[in-house]
Amino acid sequence: QVQLAESGGGLVQAGESLRLSCAYDAKGNILRTNVMGWYRQAPGKERELVATVTRGGLADYADSVKGRFAISRDNAKNTLYLQMNGLKPADTAVYYCNSRSLYGHLYWGQGTQVTVSS
């Protein structure tokens, strides 16, 4: 099991920034956090990938956030981050932290709400 706890969501205006954090606890098994990522789900829509990062720091992004969002992880602090700049109303969603083990098992946090007003 991997415990994931997101924080940092809130209400901001368009153009502003937020940084999400996800504290994770894999009970000492680093294979459970092989790839970590952020997903989001807007009302009435399916959950979608925002960004992922490997344990070695290789990042990938959805086209909709490239150039605006930056994902990073601090393996020593067991924390995943998502720096979100230039926020748009279309970014409004519940953001979920995700961990994928080396064997493909998925773990999810409870989510944090991000609301961007125009």
Image (tube, grey):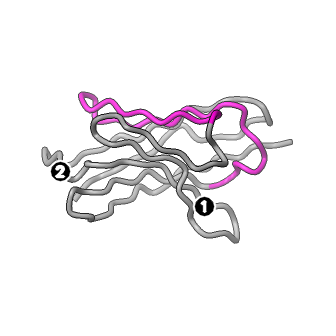
Residue 117 got which mark? none
Q: Horizontal and vertical percent for residue 70? A: 53, 33
The residue nearer to you, when weighing 74 against 65, is 65
Label 1 and label 2: CA atoms lie apart by 26 Å
Q: Which residues are magenta?
A: 67-93
| Quarter of the view holding residue 67 | top right
| Quarter of the view holding residue 13 | top right
| Quarter of the view holding residue 42 | bottom right
Depicted 103 relative to depicted 60: above or below: below
Q: Indicate which disc, 1 or 2, sits on the residue closer to the N terminus.
A: 2
**Counting other residues with Cα less than 10 Å from the Cα at mark 2, is it few (<14), some (14-19), or many (20 or more)?**
some
Residue extending farthest left = 28
> Total of numbered circles in the picture?
2
Is disc 1 in contact with disc 2, using a CB cutoff of under 8 Å? Answer: no
Q: Is residue 41 left or right of residue 71?
A: right
**SS for callout 1:** strand
Depicted 10 relative to depicted 42: above or below: above
Residue drawn at the location 26% of the way across and 48% of the way down:
33
The residue nearer to you, when weighing 86 against 92, is 86
Callout in the foreground (1, 2): 2
**SS for callout 2:** helix
Q: Report the residue marked by disc 1.
A: 41
Type of residue at label 2? Answer: Leu
- Image quadrant holding the N terminus, namely bottom left
The residue nearer to you, when weighing 81 against 62, is 62
Residue drawn at the location 56% of the way across and 61% of the way down:
48
Q: Horizontal and vertical percent for residue 91? A: 70, 48
Residue drawn at the location 73% of the way across and 29% of the way down:
16
Q: Report the residue marked by disc 2.
A: 31
